Image (cartoon, grey):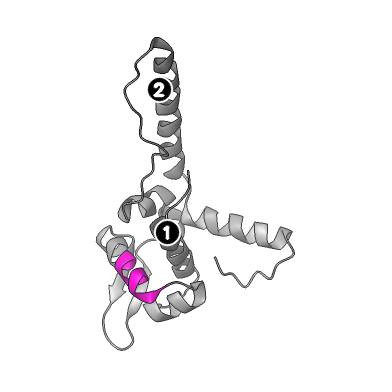
C-alpha cells in the first residue's frame, strides 16, 4: 500500500500536532513539515469533521489533537481524509484459479485494514523517532 499525497500529508500533520503542547497554526505546521498551507487547511478541516482534531478560531487560534495520540489510529486518519485503504481493486474472477487469488487478496486487504486500526499515532511517532536515532539523525522531529 502506498499513501497518496493526501494520506501522507495528513499523517505528517497529525504527528506534528502530537508534538505540540499548545494550539498550532496551519502556517506553522506547514512550515515545520514543508507542506502547502492551503491544502493542509483542507485536510485539517476533514480531520476536525472526523473528530480527530479540534480547532480554535481567532488570532491565537489553531489546531490540536482531539484525543491523546494513543487513542488516534492510522486507519482513522486515512479514512477521515478519504485515503483508500485497499491496495487494489479486485475484479470478479473468470477461472477457478482466479478465485484462489481473489480470496487471498481479500483476506490480505482485511488484515491490512485491521492493522491500520491498531497502529496508534503514538506508536508511529516512537517508531519514527527510533528509526531516526538508529540512522544517527537529529531527533528534533520532522516527519
Q: Which mark is residue 102?
A: 2
Q: Give the overall secondary structure of the magenta segment.
A: helix
Compare marks 1 and 2 and give the one earlier in the sequence: 1
Q: Which mark is residue 5?
A: 1
Q: Which mark is residue 138?
A: none
Looking at the picture, does residue 81 appear above or below residue 26? above
- Say few, some or many: other residues with alpha carbon within 10 Å of mark 2 (under 14 / 14 to 19 / 20 or more): some
Can residue 23 be spotted in the picture?
A: no
Residue pushed farthest top?
A: 96
Q: Write the residue at 39% across / 16% down.
A: 99
Pick the residue in front: 23 or 39.
39
Q: Point out residue 127 in the picture as x, y percentages from the top left corner.
A: 60, 54
Q: What secondary structure is found at the residue carrying circle 2?
A: helix
Q: Quarter-wise, where is residue 117 in the image?
A: top left
Q: Quarter-wise, where is residue 93 in the image?
A: top left
Pick the residue in front: 120 or 74.
74
Q: Write the residue at 38% across / 54% down.
A: 77
What range of the chain is rendered magenta? 36-44
Q: Point out residue 1 in the picture as x, y percentages from the top left corner.
A: 47, 43
| Alpha carbon separation for disc pair 1 and 2 | 28 Å
The answer to whether the residue labelled 1 contacts the one labelled 2, judged by CB atoms less than 8 Å apart, is no
Q: Quadrant of the C terminus?
A: bottom right
Q: What secondary structure is found at the residue carrying circle 1?
A: helix
Pick the residue in front: 112 or 70.
112
Is residue 85 located in the magenta-colored stretch of the structure?
no
Amino acid at each position: 500500500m502506498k499513501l497518496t499525497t493526501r494520506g501522507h500529508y495528513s499523517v505528517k500533520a497529525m504527528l506534528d500536532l502530537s508534538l505540540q503542547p499548545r494550539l498550532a497554526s496551519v502556517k506553522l505546521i506547514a512550515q515545520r513539515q514543508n507542506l502547502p498551507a492551503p491544502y493542509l487547511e483542507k485536510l485539517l478541516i476533514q480531520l476536525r469533521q472526523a473528530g480527530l482534531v479540534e480547532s480554535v478560531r481567532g488570532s491565537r487560534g489553531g489546531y490540536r489533537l482531539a484525543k491523546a495520540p494513543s487513542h488516534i489510529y492510522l486507519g482513522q486518519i486515512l479514512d477521515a481524509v478519504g485515503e483508500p485503504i485497499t491496495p487494489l481493486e479486485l475484479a470478479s474472477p473468470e477461472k477457478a484459479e482466479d478465485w484462489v487469488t481473489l480470496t487471498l487478496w481479500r483476506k490480505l486487504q482485511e488484515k491490512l485494514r485491521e492493522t491500520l486500526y491498531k497502529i496508534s499515532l503514538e506508536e508511529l511517532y516512537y517508531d519514527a523517532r527510533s528509526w531516526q536515532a538508529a540512522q544517527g539523525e537529529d531527533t528534533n522531529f520532522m516527519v
